[in-house]
Amino acid sequence: MDAGYTVLKVTKDDGAYIYASGAYDDATGATGAGGHLYPRAFASGWTDVRFVNIVGAGLSMPVDNPEITYPTTLYKSTGTVIQGVSGPTGDIRGEGTGYVGIGSAPYTLPRNTTYSGAIYAIYEGTHNYTGKVGIGISSPSSYYEGGFTTKDH
């Protein structure tokens, strides 16, 4: 599968189940030597990374820190898991397990609404950073993002 944000299915209550081919490798590779995030990763002592699928109705998805830069009522998130039997395959799959407003309780996405979505990496260390995962390691050519419309029934 080509690198990108692929919507596998949309359910009436859970939003989109998504697949991002190569996103894990791009996100972690960007923090290594020669990666576009290496200076920040080194200075901030990043030791771990986790991923979320963040969506916004009719919104452009920001590159950095949507939960800090924008009102939390605009963006909704669901956790994602790394796929693989004995280890990561380089891909990320987002489970459509419902959404939450960042910092709030579970939320059901309104039906028949078009959403933009993107995979974000949350790098953790001395200074955490949340950013949209780019396609590519040394310089992102684009991002793991796409759109979907929730079911109307």
Image: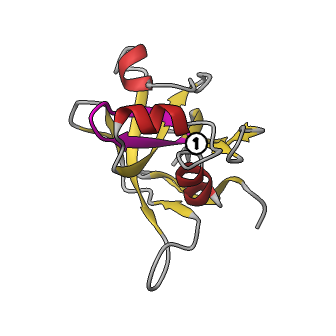
Q: Position of residue 76 (x, y in %)?
A: 40, 34
The crowd level at tag 1 (other Cα within 10 Å; few <14, some 14-19, many 20+) is many
Q: Which residue corresponds to the image point at 37% horizontal and 25% vertical from the top-left?
A: 67
Q: Which residue corresponds to the image point at 59% horizontal and 53% vertical from the top-left?
A: 29
Q: Is residue 91 left or right of residue 87?
A: right
- Tell me where the magenta segment starts and ends, as one range: 119-133
**Outermost residue toward the bottom?**
86
Q: Position of residue 97 (x, y in %)?
A: 37, 56
Q: Is residue 55 magenta?
A: no
Q: Position of residue 84 (x, y in %)?
A: 49, 78
Q: Is residue 146 above or below residue 85?
A: above
Q: Amino acid at mark 1?
A: Val
Q: Which residue corresponds to the image point at 36% horizontal and 33% vertical from the top-left?
A: 44
Q: Which residue corresponds to the image point at 39% horizontal and 40% vertical from the top-left?
A: 77
Q: Is residue 121 magenta?
A: yes
Q: Residue 62 sits in which quadrant?
A: top right
Q: Residue 139 sits in which quadrant?
A: top right
Residue 136 seen in this snapshot = yes
- Closer to the camera in the image, 29 or 114: 29
Q: Position of residue 121 (x, y in %)?
A: 46, 43
What residue did someone put label 1 on? Answer: 133
Residue 144 seen in this snapshot = no
**Outermost residue toward the left?**
105
